[in-house]
Image (spheres, helix red, strand yellow):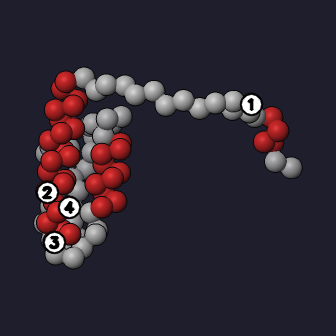
Amino acid sequence: MCPGHLLKKWQQEEAIRVQMDQELEEAYQEVEDKLFTAVKSALSRGSKALLGTYLNTLLSYPDRPFDNESLAYPNWVEVTNTFL
């Protein structure tokens, strides 16, 4: 039997935007710019391999802007190194 009946029912869900502080916003912008350049380059070569990386990195970066591994494009070049 599923214990779903024990969970509180949501009446309403609300998203609240929170502004990044200046230091985080600047670092985020640098990551976004470098990844966007890499994605454009990959797309011009007919590859969509970095699109998921682009999305996941930018969505998770504000919550965890540290301990990120370098991102690499398969059979090409390292996309990021020290800026993540």
Q: CA distance from mark 4 to mark 1?
A: 42 Å
Residue bearing the label numbered 2: 37
Q: Quadrant of residue 14?
A: top right
Q: Quadrant of the C terminus?
A: top left
Mark 3, Cα crowd under 10 Å, few <14 / some 14-19 / many 20+, is few
Residue 28: x %, y % from top left: 21, 38
Is there CB contact under 8 Å for labels 4 and 2?
yes
Pick out the residue farthest to the right.
Answer: 1
Q: Nearer the viewer, residue 69 or 44?
A: 44
Which residue sits at x=20%, y=69%? Answer: 43
Q: Earlier in the sequence, mark 1 or mark 3?
A: 1
Question: Mark 3 or mark 4, which has the lower sequence index?
Answer: 4
In space, the residues marked 3 and 2 are separated at their CA atoms by: 11 Å
**Which residue is pictured at 24% across the width and 73% down the height?**
47
Q: Which residue in the protein does label 3 denote?
A: 44
**Amino acid on which disc 2 is placed:** Thr
Q: Which residue is mark 4?
A: 39
Q: Residue 8: which disc? A: 1
**Residue drawn 15% across the image and 48% down it:** 33
Give me the disc on residue 36. Answer: none
